[in-house]
Amino acid sequence: MSRLEARPAPSRAMMLASPLIAALAMLVSGSILFMAMGQEPLHAFYVYFIKPATTLYGVGELLLKATPLILCGVGLAIGFRADVHNIGADGQLTVGAIAAGCVALYFDGVEAPWVLPLMLVAGALGGMAWAAIPALLRTRFNTSEILVSLMLVYVAYLLLSYLVHGPLRDPDGFNFPQSKMFGDAATLPLLVEGLRVNGAFVLSLVSVAGAWFFCRHTFAGYRMQVSGMSPAAALYAGFSAPRNVWLAFLVSGAMAGLAGVGEVAGPIGQLQPSVSPGYGFAAIIVAYVGRLHPVGVLLAALLMSLLYIGGEAAQIELQLPSAITGLFQGLLLFYLLAADLFIHYRFKPRTRVAPVATPEIAA
């Protein structure tokens, strides 16, 4: 028998290499999976991981899908560094999209340059307001922020569904559950003509730079890092735990709300019953694969985006089910957590203690 024993000092080199190890293990498992499904592994990997990025349009789609993952992932990583677990980024993204969509519809027909900035502000405030609910319940009533933020995701889904089926439904939309198309002043500009990647990608790069500066050069970022690494040391130093909770949720909620604006003011162009295929949940994997570092989040988001567009290509060319994308995402997270386990712990055999013989007492 053996037991897990904490390592005195986890290897920093292995911490940096573990995402690559996890990605390699994912590819090995994927090859076995492809063979079980009757596919030639090399051809399947080419279709899934290489072919989507061989054209300019494919690169544009890669950056387009990476944008919400970067925005959500950066916000979540800041909170995770402080051991504050916001699992409801997809709900905050949805509410941010609703808030921005309401602004766009209210000013429908107004071709003014201030409409789009107002949508961005409304989206960020909407995401912050939705994130403030679990923050308030955690700091006031000590509830689990994981459960509350997760349950609010489905409330946000239902709220969006109600609005597009009712008050915000396009009266000229043949009874389809969707809003009117946004005007030109309420849509993000394209970065390259002919591609769908838009100004939200530039915003995501700015968020990466801002998050790096916040974590590296501000006292608030240092305070949150200390709280995540050693809660006892943070308590001894007088750092406020409720302040960290509020800051983590408000920042991540604002980032998720901006991601929602990027979707409805970008490729979608209107409110629909669903504005996210699960970007907020995938961003959790992005944050951990990126080792909670803003630059790492950027690289991990590109990898996760490749899984999305590769899954779509595999459905079309290889006739594989859509669940293959979620399977690869789950494998990546599973192997990363397994690598982290062996980075921080090691197996140590249990030593058997020989029974002590008691001397016999002579009669």
Image (cartoon, rainbow, N blue to C red):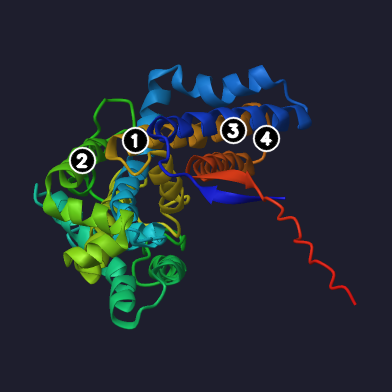
Q: On the image, numbered disc 1 is attached to which residue?
A: 296
Residue displayed at 25% across by 68% down: 241
Amino acid type at mark 3: Met
Quarter of the image that includes the C terminus: bottom right
* Label 2 to label 4: alpha-carbon separation: 39 Å
Q: Earlier in the sequence, mark 4 or mark 3?
A: 3
Compared to residue 92, the image places residue 210 above or below, namely above
* Label 1 to label 4: alpha-carbon separation: 30 Å
From the viewer's side, name the closer residue of 94 and 355. 355
Amino acid type at mark 2: Trp
Q: Earlier in the sequence, mark 2 or mark 4?
A: 2
SS at circle 1: helix
Whole-percent x, y for residue 49 in the image:
53, 24
Q: On the image, numbered disc 3 is attached to which residue?
A: 26
User: Which dot, 1 or 4, sits closer to the camera?
Assistant: 1
* Label 1 to label 3: alpha-carbon separation: 18 Å
Q: On the image, numbered disc 2 is attached to which residue?
A: 212
Whole-percent x, y for residue 212 in the image:
20, 40
Q: On the image, numbered disc 4 is attached to which residue?
A: 320
Whole-percent x, y for residue 192 in the image:
26, 25
SS at circle 3: helix
* Label 2 to label 3: alpha-carbon separation: 29 Å
Spot the residue most to the right. 363
Q: Is residue 340 left or right of residue 216?
A: right
Compared to residue 316, the image places residue 53 above or below, namely above
SS at circle 2: helix
Instruction: Confirm whether residue 103 shows in the render.
Output: no
The image quadrant of residue 325 is top right
User: Which dot, 4 or 3, sits closer to the camera?
Assistant: 3
From the viewer's side, name the closer residue of 152 and 119. 152
Q: Earlier in the sequence, mark 1 or mark 3?
A: 3
